[in-house]
Image (cartoon, helix red, strand yellow):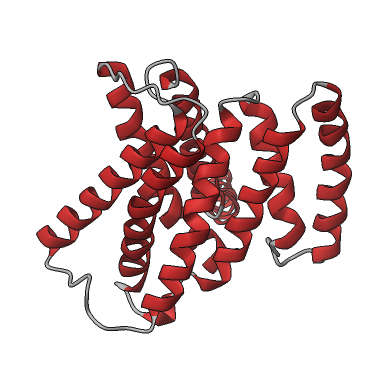
Amino acid sequence: MHVPAGQVAPLRHNVYMSAVSAFTASRLRPLLPLSGAVVCWLLQYASVQRASPQVAPLFQASVAVAWAMLLLWLWTRWRGIALFAQGTSLLAALRGGVLFTLQWACLYLAVDRLPLWLVAASFALAALLVVRWPEALHPAVFKLTALAGMLPLAAWSWAQGRTTPWLLTLLAAGCLAAGLPQSPRAADGPHALLRWRFYQLCVAALLLPLLAVAFSPSWTFDPGAAALGAMLLQAVCGGLVFAFLLCRITTHPE
């Protein structure tokens, strides 16, 4: 078939643009869950700082996790998913629930005493010390990078007299990293992650109020509309969306 000379350039241009689009999509698509997880994390803990004058952080955590549990239960009821079906995920989820409770308690306490950027940086770098992601590079590279980044943050926190909340952030990162290997994978079934997360939220809903009463430095609880909205945002971003995005990232790191 003869192609007119004037159409050769447009055809080549279209082929080139298609190849560029395909390459860009293949590179950017894996970054979407990671970007969403970062946004959810920042929104969650920024809202903690904003609502803390009305509601003490640990009490915010207690309310947010209870709302997340209720929202997940309502969604699964609407979809006809049996959350209490027997499966191998129960014990792992209960153990993960304890780690999740400690993670939230430590971060909610830390974010009320440190700048959000310091909590975010310390949390991410500490997690890289023990989490192997992405697998394309050697884990030692990430461990050394994280350690090198944490040293100046540790010195800055010590100089500012903020060592305790910084250590709380590191403990929270350790709890996250310890719980990741227990999270379900695609081979465990489509509903395994839902049950695992629901059991986690149930454990946290039982333990966080006790931790709030025992360890909260303030018992402030006078929520206005802004504080209620902040706690709902925490329930959706931190209690639900972040967990599913993180599972997708760690299951499909490529």
On the image, the x and y values in percent for residue 254 come to 61, 64
The front one of 164 and 146 is 164
Position of 121 with respect to 106 (left or right) is right
From this view, report whether residue 143 is shown above or below residue 183: above
Position of 142 with respect to 198 (left or right) is right
On the image, the x and y values in percent for residue 216 come to 49, 33
Question: Which residue occupies 69% across, 62% down?
Answer: 131
Question: Which residue occupies 55% across, 53% down?
Answer: 15
On the image, the x and y values in percent for residue 52 come to 45, 21
Question: Which residue occupies 70% across, 30% down?
Answer: 118
From this view, report whether residue 16 is shown above or below residue 76: above
- Farthest residue in the front direction? 214
From this view, report whether residue 180 is shown above or below residue 110: below
Q: Quadrant of residue 63?
A: top left
Total marks shown come to 0
Can I make out residue 98 in this image?
yes
On the image, the x and y values in percent for residue 202 come to 31, 58
Question: Which residue occupies 42% across, 70% down?
Answer: 93
The front one of 168 and 246 is 168
Position of 93 with respect to 71 (left or right) is right
